[in-house]
Amino acid sequence: MLLQLKIQIEGISKPPVWRKVLVPDHFTFERLHQVIQAAFGWSDSHCYAFSPAGYGSVPQIGVPDEGGWMDTEILDSSKIKISKILTTKGMTFSYVYDFGDDWVHSLQLEDVTDEKAIRATLVSGKGACPPEDCGGVWGYDNLVDAVNNTYHPEHDDMRNWMGMDEGETWDKSSFDLHKAQKEVAAV
């Protein structure tokens, strides 16, 4: 079966940043994490966790904390198939990427079809993915204000941090669907 998921970064609304994917039900949560990383353009350089009962709830599904740093038990995402949790059309759950910046993504199971597939497919999306390590929603809002506003006190610093050339602009609504589809297909 194929599960159609709409995934949206919470706290960003102008424009919203979301992706719609079709994912085979035999995927593990680890593989779903990889699909989300590819669909949004994240670099997979931080920890993550899924919370089936909503943001901050337990149990969480991710990479187990073998070092004992976390207060919460995290179930191994490589061993749990998404079909065990994602059972009801319309259900929602959370995915958090980067526990420092705390990028909370809401996921909704929009549809379940009898179609079969080996790979995930990115169907559609909107909005540029925020840059890694920009400080979460608050930092992203500040970055958006600064990079294209020459009067902003952090204008030059933010542009340098992003590696922007003189005269280059940054469009927060930009999203290259075809490029992201290739990335998702490679997962």
Image: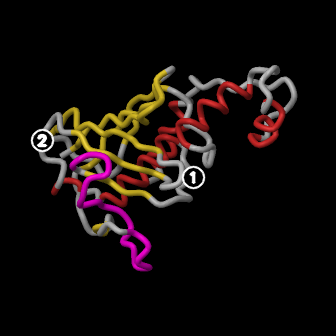
| Residue drawn where x is 31% and y is 58% of the image | 29
The segment highlighted magenta reads: 53-70
Q: Quadrant of the C terminus?
A: bottom left
Q: Is residue 63 magenta?
A: yes
Residue, disc 1: 43
| Residue drawn where x is 78% and y is 33% of the image | 154
User: Which of these two is toward me, 71 or 166?
Assistant: 71
In whole angstroms, how far apart are the C-alphas of marks 2 and 1?
30 Å
User: Which amino acid is tagged 2?
Assistant: Thr
Residues tagged 2 and 1 counted as in contact (Cβ below 8 A):
no
Position of residue 77 measured from the top left corner of the image (x, y, whole percent): 32, 64
Q: Secondary structure at mark 2?
A: loop
Q: Quadrant of residue 64?
A: bottom left
Q: With 1 as the anchor, is 146 left or right in this view?
A: right
- Could you say which disc has been placed on residue 1 in the image? none
- Could you say which disc has been placed on residue 88 in the image? 2
| Residue drawn where x is 53% and y is 54% of the image | 100
Position of residue 119 measured from the top left corner of the image (x, y, whole percent): 35, 50
Q: With 22 as the anchor, is 145 left or right in this view?
A: right
Q: Quadrant of residue 115?
A: top left
Up/down of 55 relative to 155, above or below: below
Residue ranking furthest to the bottom:
67
Mark with earlier residue (2, 1): 1
Position of residue 61 measured from the top left corner of the image (x, y, whole percent): 30, 61
Q: Secondary structure at mark 1?
A: loop
Q: Is residue 142 magenta?
A: no
User: Which of these two is toward me, 47 or 31?
Assistant: 47
Q: With 153 as the anchor, is 88 left or right in this view?
A: left
Up/down of 112 relative to 36, above or below: above
| Residue drawn where x is 22% and y is 43% of the image | 2
